[in-house]
Structures are given as structure tokens and as C-alpha cells.
Amino acid sequence: MTIRIGILGYGNLGRGIEYAIAQNDDMELVGVFTRRNPEDVKTNSNVPVYSASELASMKDKIDVLMLCGGSATDLPEQTPHYAKDFNVVDSFDTHARIPEHFSNVDASAKSGGKIAMISVGWDPGMFSLNRLYANAILRDGNDYTFWGKGVSQGHSDAIRRIPGVKDAKQYTIPVEAALESVRACENPELSTRQKHTRECFVVAEEGADKAKIEQAIKTMPNYFADYDTTVHFISEEELKRDHAGIPHGGFVLRTGRTGKDGEHNHVIEYNLKLDSNPEFTACVLTAYARAAYRMNQRGLSGCKTVFDVAPADLSPLSPEEMRAHLL
Amino acid sequence: MTIRIGILGYGNLGRGIEYAIAQNDDMELVGVFTRRNPEDVKTNSNVPVYSASELASMKDKIDVLMLCGGSATDLPEQTPHYAKDFNVVDSFDTHARIPEHFSNVDASAKSGGKIAMISVGWDPGMFSLNRLYANAILRDGNDYTFWGKGVSQGHSDAIRRIPGVKDAKQYTIPVEAALESVRACENPELSTRQKHTRECFVVAEEGADKAKIEQAIKTMPNYFADYDTTVHFISEEELKRDHAGIPHGGFVLRTGRTGKDGEHNHVIEYNLKLDSNPEFTACVLTAYARAAYRMNQRGLSGCKTVFDVAPADLSPLSPEEMRAHLL
């Protein structure tokens, strides 16, 4: 039984899902759907490109619709809208607004008898799962999440908005000494500055005041002021050559105590090193598409998160194969 | 609603569960059950100690029975036996015999309408979960599991059986260079010798031939012959002072490729550093006791593994709390 997938939105994430589906024999990409003119969208495979408006007539042709819009404005509208008619998966990542998003999506998915899997990816997503597992196991302990080394799109954008900046890329870097202290079960209380540094590669416009740009970056509230920030001015060619990728990653740690008097320390660590943030995120969404489809086939509906999905539903292997080869 | 727990078998694992239950407000330890004379068993808390035979009359007083016997002979018999009358959790860890154990336990648990959660712990258990998640996400990749640094009970026992050995402790140690090669996405093919080394601390009997003991260890088939093994002869006092603990841990890694031509590499790593192997294992079993109880309350029955359990069922938090604080 092949799972028929549709992709709504063909940016980095949508392309990543296209690649991921090609790695999964039990899935088939039905089409890419776009709000742009379909003729302007060229896909990597031979999959047809449709206008998003055509989704309304393709309810029976798609088992799971992957929503690849942004969390700021697209998904809060798209996920509740499409969850009425399709099993959907989204990567909604505005942590503070997840409860509100969940409740909107849940009502819609239940009304249509569909599964809507929200906030899938690596954070929220795999990192959330690791926080949950580690907290359920080590009840008396401390949680730490570090991000990076990786490109923060939001911080790169913030630099680009500074007058005199032509282009920029910002890397978030975890502080190695902080990581080591956590791993040594020292249970440090870490300030924002102690956890991450920020490294910026900036292309200045000709004649721009570089000292002023550097000052504007380093004192920018919320984005940079609370961090030790390094600014490098480089040429446009160097930016293209050395900083074209979208790598990311990070670390989830929980340390905890057990025993008669808490005399034994334990460290649970999960870490990711990703050459391509959107392609890895796409792989996670694709695995959860399988689960969304299976759960709906079993008659389930409503909004779900990674917390609600039994791991077995993510794997193409049979239960017997899983027990024999992965357990 | 308090989950009422019974512990069958009061060794290191049973004691670990006793400690773990004290860290979980939604659980209560009803009693420790033993095949020994109950009067000879002193628990750390004030919990009553019963003879194992009394379990037959306590079916209504226990929500989940934790089976703390060994995998070689105890659990293959105990888990099917008790799964008829109790929700049970075991740590059956003979990987090759899991399919057989599953099938025996499944029939029994289904006949009694109970949940039997088998092979819970960290390997099998948390390591298995991480293998499954990573394989579902990175479809084109390679898996690696390293164990240690930690005490292998089986290898320590094997040394103790050598004539002239009074006592011994064996540590399994992952080879750092192999780990680094995996993390660098070099996809090495690693022989047994290239993955782990073995370090042995041996107390010889007075007058024993140490050279002969060392030779016997290093050439022992299966246990040591395929490894680079180091042997240290130490005094009984040193063994007691420096090697009394039961630490363990290890690493699960999967590296994989994504993109149009597999041009992007990704590394997923999960690692554990445990001061006490049995106490950490006990914490995992205790979290899965919560899931066993909840799944049975929802009318489910049969044999389950960590693959079948939605993560949310492990946590004492409500779904709303989980989404707000862990997602």
C-alpha cells in the first residue's frame, strides 16, 4: 500500500520532502501545490505542479498533505484549513503559540475525521521527544538544550535589515565549556551569554561605515545584545563560497540523580549535526506522514504531536522486523 | 490516581526500582516479592516483603508487577506466567531470543487481558528507540552502537571462573578513534577489535601464576580473543576501593545522506553516561510501568515493547503541560 503525498509550498522544506519521499519505497509524491503560478515552479523530479486551489478537488488522491509554509503567518491559517479535508503534517515552530495552534487544528481535524500532526521537525520535534523521554526517566534532574553550530535565519535576516548591509549569515555556536560542565553533572545555572556565542559574516555595501554596522549588530536587543558576538566583514564572493549552506544542529541533555541518597549521577545526551537543516526537517516530517496515515487508517483523528505517536508507526518495517533487528 | 507497583526479585534492579518509585509521586510501592525467605530480605524503605507465592492472592492490589529476574532462566518463565494476572514490565535483554519471548508473553498477556512490556531498559530499550527513530528519519545511512565505558557483568564473571582468580572487574571501552570516524561521516566498516577495548582488573589468589591468568584471559574465545585486552593485577582492597561501582553507558549513532545526490551528511547521536547501570535501567522500567498501566486502563492488552508506546504515556505530566513545557 503506497502512501500518496502532496506538498504544499515549494521552498527549502518542500524540496527536502521531495528528496525524502524518493528515499521511502512505501511513498509516492502525487504533486507539488503552490500559491505561485505553477508554470513558474520547476521541481527536481517529474512530479506535476498544481495551483494550491486545485487541492479542493484532489481530496481522494492524497493520503497526507505536507504543509511547508512558515510559522509566522502561513501555518496558523493553513493547518486548520487543510486539516478538515486531509491528513496533514506541519513544522509549526513558534514554541509559545503551540497550545493555541493545537487547539485550532484539533477542532478542525476532528470535524473532518483526519489526523493533523503539528510541530514536527527537530526542535520542536526530535529535541522535544528527547526532553520528554529523559524527564520521564530521570525524575530528579536538570534539562539543557543547546543549539548549533548552525545558521539562524532570523538572526541573519536581522543583520540584513541594518543600513549598509548587503548580505549576512549568522551562526549560533554552543559554548563548549558550558556543554562540558553540563556533561560533568555540575548542574550549572547558565545565563544566555554563557550558553551560546554568535558569529556573523557580513557583506557591507561599498562605502558603508563598518564600525557602525558592527556596533549596530552587537547592541541589537534580543538578537545580539545578550551574547558575545563576533562580526567578520567579508566579500560577497566569500559569503557565496564559504557560507552558502544551511547547517544546524544542537544538543539536548538531561542530568539526574538516583539511588538511596541521590549518590549516582546520569547523563542522557542527544545531539544532531546537520549539513542541511531543511532537508533533515523534511526527513522527520516524512516519517511522521507515515504515522499520520496509519493512525488515520486505524480510525483516529484530531491534532497530534510527536508525543502522541508510537515509534513503531514511523518505521516502514513490520513489527516482527523491528523487534528482530532494531530492539 | 496512584499506580500501585509490586517488585518481584530484590537484587540491584529491584532496589533501583524501589528508589525510582520514591521519585514518582503518582506511584506507590505495595510490596517486594521474593523467592527467598521474606524475613531474610531487608528493604531500604518500610515496604513489606512477601513470599513470591503470595502474589496469587494479591491480583487486585497491584497495578503493575516489575519482574526483576535474569534473562537467562528467570524471565523466560516468569514473564509469561505473571502476564496472565498482572500488567508486567521486564528487562529481558537476550536480543536473539526476543522474538520467541515476545510470542510466549503475548499469548499469555492477551489471555488475561493484561499489558506485558518486555525488553525495557537502555539496550534493549532507549538504544533500540534511538535506532528506530534514526532509521525512520535517515533512510539512507549507517548504524553504529558502542557500549561503555562500563562494567560488563558477563565478562567479569568469565574472568572469575579462571583458576587462580579471586575476584575481577571488566570494563568495556569504546575506541575513541572509531567514534570520531563515525561522527565525521566516514562510514567506517569496523571490526570487533576496532570498536571496543577491554580492560580487566584482577585479584589473583596468593601464589597464582599471573602470567598464566593473563594469557587465559586474553585468549578466551568470544569474550576476549577478538579484542585488545589489558589486564591489571591489583589487591583486593584496591578492587573494593576503586571498582565497586556498576557504571555503564554507550553511544547510538546513525549517519545518513539527503539531498538531490546525497550531498548532505547528517549525524544523529544518542549517548548515556551512567554511574549505576541497574538504577538507570530501573528508572526506565518505572516510566514504562506508567505506560503499561495507562494502556491497560484504555483496554489494551498483549505484549508490547518500547516501540509500541507513545512517549506521552511515559510522562506524569498532562498533555497540555507537555505541549507547553517540553514540545
Image (tube, coloured by chain):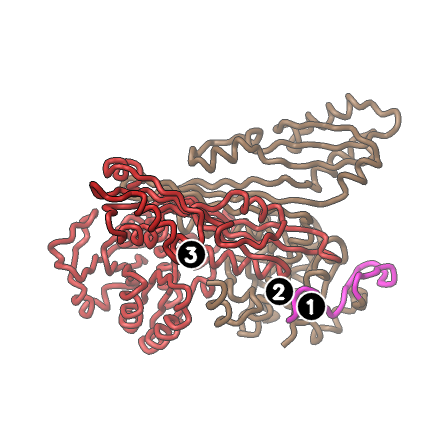
Chain colours: A red, B brown
Residue B35, placed above or below residue B130: below
The kind of residue on which mark 3 rests is: Asp
Of the residues shown, which amino acid type is indicated by label 1? Ile
Q: In the picture, residue B255 is in which quadrant?
A: top left
Within 10 Å of disc 3 (Cα), the crowding (few <14, some 14-19, many 20+) is many
For residue B289, the mark is 2
Marks 1 and 2: in contact by CB < 8 Å? yes
Q: Which residue is mark 3?
A: A123
Horizontally, residue A25 falls left or right of residue B218, namely left
Q: Residue at x 13, y 57 (%)?
A: A38
Question: What stretch of residues is rendered in magenta?
Answer: B22-45
Q: CA distance from mark 3 to mark 1?
A: 35 Å
**Can residue B310 be seen here?**
no
**Seen in the image, is B228 located left or right of residue B30?**
left
Kindly report which numbered mark, 3 or 2, lies closer to the viewer in this rendering.
3
x and y, in percent, of residue A277 in the image: 35, 49
B42 within the magenta span: yes
Density class for disc 2 (Cα within 10 Å; few <14, some 14-19, many ≥20) is many
In percent of width and height, residue B263 lies at: 31, 39
